[in-house]
Amino acid sequence: MPDIACLNGTITPLNDAKVSVNDRGFLFGDGVYEVIRTYGSRPFRLEAHLDRLYQSLSQVRIVPNWERATLTAWIDAVLARAGHAETKIYVQVTRGVAPRNHPFPPVPPTTLVTATEIHPLPADVVRAGVAAISMPDIRWARCDVKSLNLLPNVLARQAALDAGAFEALFVGDGVVREGSSSNVFGVIGGALVTPPLGPRLLPGVSRAYLLEVARDLGLTVHERDLSLAELQAADEVFLTGTTIEVLGVTRIDGATIGNGTVGPVTRRLAARFRPAARAAG
Ligand code: PDD
């Protein structure tokens, strides 16, 4: 099945889509993005992703030159053309193409939508859980904006892989914020604990959905700050994200979480997350 792109409204095979070297996304990382996935071939929580995209765009002062319905139609079009069983939809909007100069140029934004096949994590990885490391949070103060500037995230993720771990957790001002591309939760005394929303972390669509699932299951949820030591001492820890769904963490910086296996609350939430996501479409 082909991977498909829609670049400023023109649909082509992914490899045929070309952007100028003067695109500000390339030169400055001057843009924002979303990653959306399908369940049952339908985009999951599309409106929440589009709301967050509009929020990111307005925070970085990029004015889209399309209507929301047009963007939705592009997403539908790439999905239909790609025809994958389940698809990862990537949307990126940059400030457009202009000779390199810092001030905003008077040009339209560049809008890219791609559809590629989703490769879920191997089942044995999900069953066993993963290790994480902590990293100082050296990112900017507006991590609620889904900006293309992912250098600290990229470095952190690679540091995690180099250390034999899966994810890096950013820690700043004595509290854990989120992973390099995931939100983080602890299970403490039977209750779920996750860092509160604010400018230092991304308001994850999966995070919001997980909280709905947890409340449906009757779990108590606390959105509050957590120190790294508190998270390491939690009964269970897990990550959420569009591509990883719910993923248990069994070690952080070498400290074993709980008994070192994916715990019962995480397993229960993970089991509910996927079928429910499919039904919720
Ligand atoms: N990342 N925190 C960060 C820093 C992220 O980059 C992401 C997602 C999340 C989880 O958000 P959501 O549940 O809406 O996917 C949290 C995407 C998947 C990425 O950059 O590939």
Image: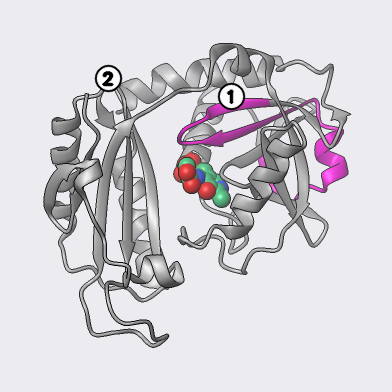
Residue contact between numbered discs 1 and 2, judged by CB atoms under 8 Å: no
- Mark 2 — residue? 85
In the image, residue 264 lies at what x, y percent?
69, 14
In the picture, measured across the screen, residue 230 lies left or right of residue 62, that is right
In the rendered structure, which disc, 1 or 2, sits on the residue that comes first in sequence?
Answer: 2
Q: Is residue 73 visible?
A: no
Q: Whole-Å distance between the Cαs marked 1 and 2? A: 33 Å
Q: Which residue is mark 1?
A: 218
Tell me the residue at 16%/63% (across/down).
Answer: 66
In the image, what residue type sits under mark 2? Ala
Residue 54, horizontal then vertical, whole percent: 32, 61
Please tell me whether residue 132 belongs to the stretch shown in magenta.
no
The circle on residue 281 is none
Q: Point out the image quarter for the C terminus.
A: top left
Which element is circle 1 on?
Answer: loop
Q: How is the image coloured?
A: one colour
Depicted 48 relative to depicted 131: above or below? below
Give left or right: position of 201 versus 90. Answer: right
Instruction: Please identify the quadrant where the N terminus is shown.
Output: top left
Q: Note whether 18 is above or below 220 in the view shown.
A: below
Is residue 172 in sight in this rendering?
yes
User: Which range of residues does the magenta coloring cover?
Assistant: 222-248
For the residues carrying marks 1 and 2, which lies nearer the camera in this image?
Answer: 2
Rendered location of residue 160, percent (x, y): 71, 40
Hey, what amino acid is under mark 1? Answer: Gly
Q: Residue at x 37, y 82 (%)?
A: 100
In the image, residue 236 lies in the stretch drawn in magenta = yes
Q: Nearer the viewer, residue 224 or 155?
A: 155
Residue at image point 38% right, 27% down: 118
